[in-house]
């Protein structure tokens, strides 16, 4: 009986070790080395670019190659900048983002998958702007290395995707001939492994 108890105890101990879950790796945004921006046409002849000065993002990855990672992002709408104070004030108004009523833009990924190209991922998720949530797909290029000064492991993501501003109720009274309906969203962001 003692022998059977010992075998049972060893089996359960081995099982616990074998099935111990691996903790996810969290990556924190290195804000000084990150930019979140957008671009759309102006008067159908040129590109108008802007960015958000204040935003936060995290990446939580269960795998070393970022497959099935979860990305969250939150941008402060009042930090929007196009290098023109008058235009920035207009963008924050009810004509566009309505920053007082909808102070943040939020994104959370639902899928983070590899593609046929090494280092390129398809990232799907839900984007909330102006109180409206829509699914969106981004393309992300990932590169990982070591910071030579801090010796910490870092990764950089170059992200791009497109949305339609009218899908989010942005600038509904502004004709597409003045401000384009299609908006390119892009980000270059460096993250540090925790």
Image: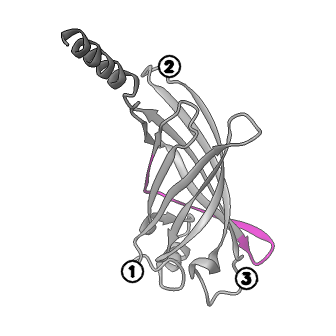
Residue drawn at 34 percent across, 18 percent down = 14
Which residue bears the numbered disc 3? 176
Which residue bears the numbered disc 2? 148
Which residue bears the numbered disc 1? 101
Q: Label 3 neighbourhood size at 10 Å, few (<14), some (14-19), many (20+)?
A: some
Please say whether residue 45 is one of the residues in the magenta stretch. Answer: yes
Foreground label between 2 and 1: 1
At mark 3, the secondary structure is: loop
Q: Label 2 neighbourhood size at 10 Å, few (<14), some (14-19), many (20+)?
A: few
Would residue 182 appear left or right of 56 to someone viewing this image? right
Gap between marks 3 and 1 measured at Cα: 24 Å
Nearer-the-camera pick, 46 or 101:
101
Q: Please say if 179 is above or below 61.
A: below
Nearer-the-camera pick, 143 or 37:
143
Please say whether residue 189 is one of the residues in the magenta stretch. Answer: no
Image coordinates for residue 93, horizontal then vertical, percent: 47, 82
- For this orientation, the residue located farthest to the bottom is 173
Gap between marks 3 and 2 measured at Cα: 47 Å
At mark 1, the secondary structure is: loop
What is the span of residues highlighted in magenta in the rendered image? 41-58
Residue drawn at 54 percent across, 33 percent down = 155
Nearer-the-camera pick, 109 or 144:
109
Label whose residue precedes the other's in the sequence (2 or 1): 1
Split into 4 quadrants, where in the image is the N terminus?
top left
Would residue 46 appear left or right of 103 to someone viewing this image? right
Image coordinates for residue 2, horizontal then vertical, percent: 18, 11
Q: Label 1 neighbourhood size at 10 Å, few (<14), some (14-19), many (20+)?
A: few
């Amino acid at each position: 009986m003692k022998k059977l108890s010992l075998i049972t105890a060893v089996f359960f101990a081995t099982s616990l070790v074998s099935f111990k879950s691996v903790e996810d790796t969290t990556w924190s945004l290195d804000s000084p080395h990150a930019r979140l921006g957008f671009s759309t046409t102006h008067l159908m002849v040129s590109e108008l670019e802007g960015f958000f000065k204040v935003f936060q993002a995290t990446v939580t990855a269960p795998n070393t190659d970022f497959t099935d990672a979860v990305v969250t992002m939150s941008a402060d709408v009042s930090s929007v900048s196009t290098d023109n104070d008058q235009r920035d004030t207009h963008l924050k108004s009810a004509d566009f983002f309505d920053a007082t009523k909808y102070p943040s833009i939020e994104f959370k990924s639902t899928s983070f998958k590899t593609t046929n190209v090494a280092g390129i991922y398809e990232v799907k998720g839900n984007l909330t702007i102006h109180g409206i949530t829509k699914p969106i797909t981004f393309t992300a290029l990932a590169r990982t290395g070591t910071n030579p000064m801090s010796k910490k492991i870092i990764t950089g993501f170059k992200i791009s995707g497109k949305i339609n501003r009218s899908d989010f109720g942005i600038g509904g009274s502004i004709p597409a001939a003045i401000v384009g309906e299609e908006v390119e969203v892009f980000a270059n962001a460096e993250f540090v492994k925790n």
